[in-house]
Image (tube, rainbow, N blue to C red):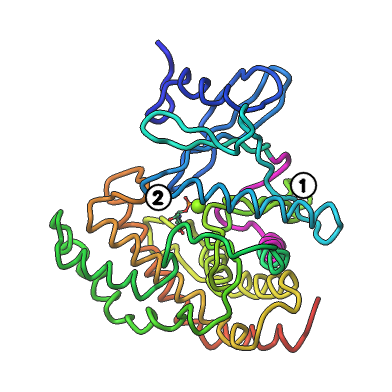
Amino acid sequence: MMRKLKDLSTGEILEIASRFQVEGRIQTVEPFGNGNVNDTFLLITDCGHPYTLQRINHDVFKDPISLMDNFARVTQHLSQKFKDGHTSLQTLVLVPALDGTSYVTGDQGNYWRVTEYVPNGLSLEVPQSREHAYEAARAFGDFQYQLRDLPGVALIETIPDFHNTESRYHAFLQALDKDPCQRASEAADLIAFARENESLATLIRYANFPTRTVHNDTKLNNVLLHETTGAGICVVDLDTVMPGCALHDFGDLVRTAACSSEEDEPDISKIHFLPDRFSALVEGYLCGVCDLLESVEVEHLAEAPQVITYELALRFLTDFLLGDTYFKVKRSGHNFERARAQFQLLRSMQEHAPQMKSTVSSCLTAGPA
Ligand code: GN1
Ligand code: MG
């Protein structure tokens, strides 16, 4: 019997993969990475060439064609910057389909794409050192900096209001009101904490900050670090690159890279904000973004991590209340655990808030490393 990977047989995946301009015949296909939304596979051909194959989740990304259009524009721009020596960071390289397009469509309206596999890349859930944190932040900062002069019209908003924390709060209230799975009573403490912190929902509003082309999903595992040197080599997961606010990128990286645990740690006694990693992130990010930021952005760097951690906690809690329909879950109660972990991290950040502010100030005074 043909082996099943996710909901597909290997044969079905091979058929999709054969519709791209890959070098050689595909020999192996394995699930790859830790994405919570798309499905990713590693392909290896008989000449040893590795590729990454991804199925775009079209429940989440309603307009995959525009998404791929953004993807192609961004990667083309970044690869030119690399060739011209403006950045040391590589970018993802799309492998065209046989008909020259950047994607193929499969059964049930699924969209698929292939990119070259990036060799020697390490994708971490928690940084193992201060240097890792610095390099990850430098890479995401550089990503924003290189995209400052993306030519042409603005990218298409693939998910409108993606980091509109206020609308995430309203979605949470609506889910709570409906409580379709009768899970609210189980989450009473988390719900109370979400309500107490409502003011975080309006602290960073898009309208109050410059609109930039940003990544929007800067989890630590979305940047590849070199497996031996630890240097940032490539920013990945480009599906949410679109107009947005620089602070959300910085905040989301801090959420995942200045925390002692993974984002779904079930034992909350293990979850702490790590001030030392935070200072490395501020230094690395400020180095990567060069002179891009305006003072209104710099003034909010210390608060952005709280806002985004709150936002993710709300999203996980909302998905728990609605019956786990958005994020992939590995076990029952997974979204509950994620929400609880994020609220715990938020609490720890709140305890360190004055220190976070002074870290940002001292990094700014110290200037470039
Ligand atoms: C999703 O699939 P992944 O892990 O790259 C989500 C992000 C969340 C993240 C939390 C399109 O990203 O916004 O921060 O899970 N992506 C989308 O782990 O919703
Ligand atoms: Mg993603």
- Which stretch did the figure color magenta? 118-139
| Image position, residue 121 (x, y; %) | 69, 45
Tag 2: residue type?
Answer: Lys
In this rendering, the count of numbered labels is 2
Is residue 194 depicted above or below 318 in this figure?
A: below
The residues bearing labels 2 and 1 have C-alpha atoms spaced at a distance of: 39 Å
Tag 1: residue type?
Answer: Thr
* Residue depicted at 17% across the width and 58% down the height: 183
The stretch drawn in magenta includes residue 368:
no
| Image position, residue 335 (x, y; %) | 32, 54
Q: Mark 2 points at which residue?
A: 62
Most extreme residue toward the right is 85
> Disc 1 on helix, strand or loop?
loop
Is residue 113 depicted above or below 10 in this figure?
A: below
* Residue depicted at 62% across the width and 84% down the height: 298
Which image quarter is the N terminus in?
A: top left
| Image position, residue 159 (x, y; %) | 43, 59
The front one of 16 and 339 is 16
Q: Name the residue under label 1.
A: 228
How many neighbours does mark 1 have within 10 angstroms: few (below 14), some (14-19), or many (20 or more)? few
Instruction: Name the disc covering residue 311, or none.
Output: none
